[in-house]
Image: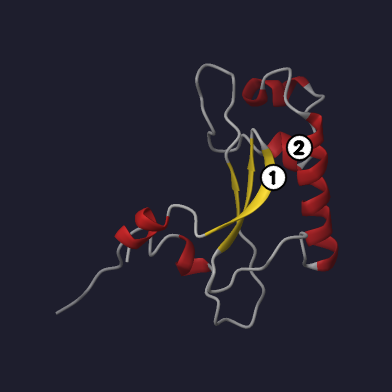
């Protein structure tokens, strides 16, 4: 009997196992876009990650009044990760820490949406 992989393959655990020797860091971008009810859509965080909120192309997803302080924080984390391998928050482990960037700023949360994650086991 053959088994096929269940998608999305255990979601977060598939790519980020606490037992692996490499360091893994997870984040979630949950700040909703004010543009056409897009919500926290795919690629919305790019203007924040690359600190490009000041260019018109970013406004297509972020709107014109996106919080610059969040962009500075996210950009700093990505530059730090590229330069040192550490974005400034706890690496993935058995407690499942995830850096959450949302309308309230940023904070590390433990095992977000655990019930949903268990459905993919």
Image spot of residue 36 (x, y percent): 52, 16
Q: Nearer the viewer, residue 49 or 67?
A: 67
Say which quarter of the image contains residue 32. top right
Image spot of residue 103 (x, y percent): 64, 33
Number of on-image labels: 2
Q: Could you tell me if residue 51 is visible in this image?
A: no
The residue identified by callout 1 is 106
Which element is circle 2 on?
A: helix
| CB atoms of marks 2 and 1 within 8 Å | yes
Q: CA distance from mark 2 to mark 1?
A: 8 Å
108 up-or-down from 24: above or below: above
Viewer-nearest of discs 2 and 1 = 1
The residue identified by callout 2 is 70
Q: Identify the residue at horizontal 54%, vertical 33% (top origin).
A: 40
Say which quarter of the image contains residue 114. bottom left
Q: Identify the residue at horizontal 36%, vertical 53% (top origin).
A: 116
Quadrant (top left/top right/bottom left/bottom right) for the N terminus: bottom left
Q: Could you tell me if residue 84 is visible in this image?
A: yes
Q: Earlier in the sequence, mark 2 or mark 1?
A: 2
Image spot of residue 18 (x, y percent): 55, 76
14 up-or-down from 49: above or below: below
Say which quarter of the image contains residue 55. top right
Quadrant (top left/top right/bottom left/bottom right) for the C terminus: bottom left
Which element is circle 1 on?
A: strand
Whether residue 53 sits left or right of residue 100 in the image: it is right
Q: Identify the residue at horizontal 65%, vertical 38% (top origin).
A: 45
The tag on residue 16 is: none
Q: Identify the residue at horizontal 30%, vertical 63% (top origin).
A: 6
């Amino acid at each position: 009997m053959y088994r096929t992989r269940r998608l999305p393959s255990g979601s977060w655990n598939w790519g980020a196992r606490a037992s692996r020797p490499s360091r893994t860091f997870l984040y979630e971008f949950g700040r909703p876009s004010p543009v056409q009810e897009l919500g926290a859509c795919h690629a919305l965080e790019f203007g924040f990650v690359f600190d490009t909120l000041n260019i018109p192309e970013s406004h297509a997803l972020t709107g014109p009044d996106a919080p610059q302080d969040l962009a500075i924080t996210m950009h700093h984390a990505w530059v730090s990760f590229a330069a040192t391998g550490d974005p400034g928050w706890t690496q993935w482990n058995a407690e499942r820490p995830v850096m959450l960037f949302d309308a309230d700023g940023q904070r590390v949360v433990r095992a977000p949406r655990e019930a949903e994650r268990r459905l993919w086991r």
